């Protein structure tokens, strides 16, 4: 779920959902995120951002562009 500049990651259940994480991602509003191979891809106002979800960190860590 992308609510403006905050991304919520949730687990769906038969009766309710569970919020797994929230992150503030400025400039990431207006498009649906995609997850592939443990990475989160977002369209931003500047281009595309990629975050490695396999690493544990206080803040999301951008993955350098190749």
Image: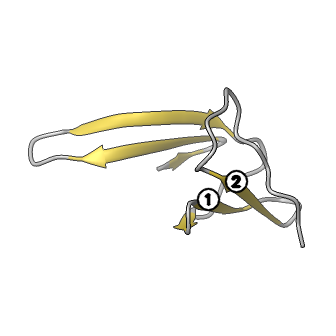
How is the structure coloured here?
A: secondary structure
Residue that label 1 marks: 40
Q: CA distance from mark 2 to mark 1?
A: 5 Å
Residue displayed at 83% across by 59% down: 45
Nearer to us in this view, 42 or 60: 60
Residue 56 position, x and y percent, is 61, 36
Total labels: the figure holds 2
**Location of residue 40 (image quadrant):** bottom right
Nearer to us in this view, 36 or 28: 36
Residue displayed at 58% across by 50% down: 54
Which label was assigned to residue 51? 2
**Location of residue 16 (image quadrant):** top left
Q: Is residue 14 left or right of residue 23?
A: left
Q: Measured along the vertical axis of the image, is residue 65 above or below residue 56?
A: below
Which label was assigned to residue 63? none
Residue 27 position, x and y percent, is 78, 49
Label 2 neighbour load within 10 Å: few <14, some 14-19, many 20+: some
Label 1 neighbour load within 10 Å: few <14, some 14-19, many 20+: some
Q: Secondary structure at mark 2?
A: strand
Q: Are marks 2 and 1 in contact (CB under 8 Å)?
A: yes
């Amino acid at each position: 779920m992308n609510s403006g500049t905050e991304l919520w990651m949730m687990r769906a259940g038969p009766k309710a959902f569970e919020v797994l994480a929230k992150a503030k991602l400025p400039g990431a509003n207006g498009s649906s995120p995609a997850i592939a191979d443990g990475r989160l891809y977002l369209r931003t106002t500047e281009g595309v951002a990629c975050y490695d979800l396999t690493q544990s960190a206080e803040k999301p860590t951008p993955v350098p562009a190749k």
